[in-house]
Image (cartoon, grey):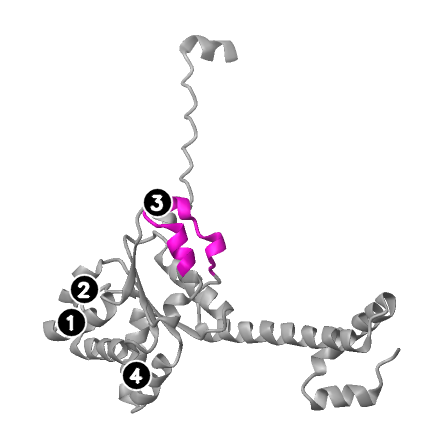
Amino acid sequence: MSITAALTSQLKALKLGRMLDTIDVRLAQARDDQLGYLEFLQLLLQDEIERRKTQSLRLRLQRASFEEPKTLEDFDFPANPSLNPAAVRDLATGLFIERREHVLLYGPAGTGKTHLAQALGHHACRTGRSVLFLKAAKLFRVLQAARADNSWEVELRRLLAPDLLIIDDFGLKPMTMTQAEDFYEIVAERHLRSSIIVTSNRPPGDWLPLFPDPVMANSALDRLAHNAHHLVMKGESYRKKMRPQTRQPATPATELTEGQTAQLR
């Protein structure tokens, strides 16, 4: 059965034009399997649902601004013996987001903190949640620029909107007073409303000196750290493992003795 121009137009008018991609296959299946009308309609609708789910996931991943498409499936748990894989997989269900809890990932550089944070964000996107990933340095630059052009409130709302905000590489250096105020504002506004994942090379106990104001520091960390799942990352840096191995220099030619030299003449 050929698809008429009228049917094509009607499907597009209903924003169901993508049904045209599979309708021929489904028609053939309906004939071969002698499907009823309702069964045939159900197949078409299920195809459309799957297409829309795929498109929605693609958009959520795009808006999340991940550095790389990292997942738990390709995370090296044996290289991180301090981690409990079952606990990490529980976090991947997104229950901590429903509870408005946070996740703090800290440990030496190269132990997979950014990978794991993005993987948890990726799983959150799969379950229909909105996510935003930002390096801490970029976060502060964006807010500084927003102050300069009077769009700070707009930018703050963008940071508060996602179900999950991921701040990567926090605490590489002390914050200015303005940066500390911005960080406090984000933590305070998201507290008990939505979730944050923070990765850092420093444990939370070492974050206090990063704030110029100790009162602000205690207030921010009280909200963040005491309502969080703490994951301590240990092990050898994966970047070091992936570094190209230096080739051994070629063995120098053996020096010929006088007798060997004479034989070559």
Q: CA distance from mark 4 to mark 3?
A: 41 Å
Between circles 3 and 2, the one closer to the viewer is: 3
Residue 229 in percent (x, y) is at: 30, 61
Res. 135 visible in picture: yes
Q: Earlier in the sequence, mark 4 or mark 2?
A: 4
Q: CA distance from mark 1 to mark 4?
A: 23 Å
Crowd rating for badge 3 (residues with CA inside 10 Å; few <14, some 14–19, many 20+): few
Q: Nearer the viewer, residue 35 or 6?
A: 35
Q: CA distance from mark 2 to mark 1?
A: 8 Å
Quadrant in the rendering for residue 197: bottom left
Q: Are marks 3 and 2 in contact (CB under 8 Å)?
A: no
Residue, disc 4: 145
- Is residue 79 a member of the stretch shown in magenta? yes
Q: Earlier in the sequence, mark 3 or mark 2?
A: 3
Mark 3 is on which residue type? Pro
Between circles 4 and 3, the one closer to the viewer is: 3
Q: Are marks 1 and 4 in contact (CB under 8 Å)?
A: no
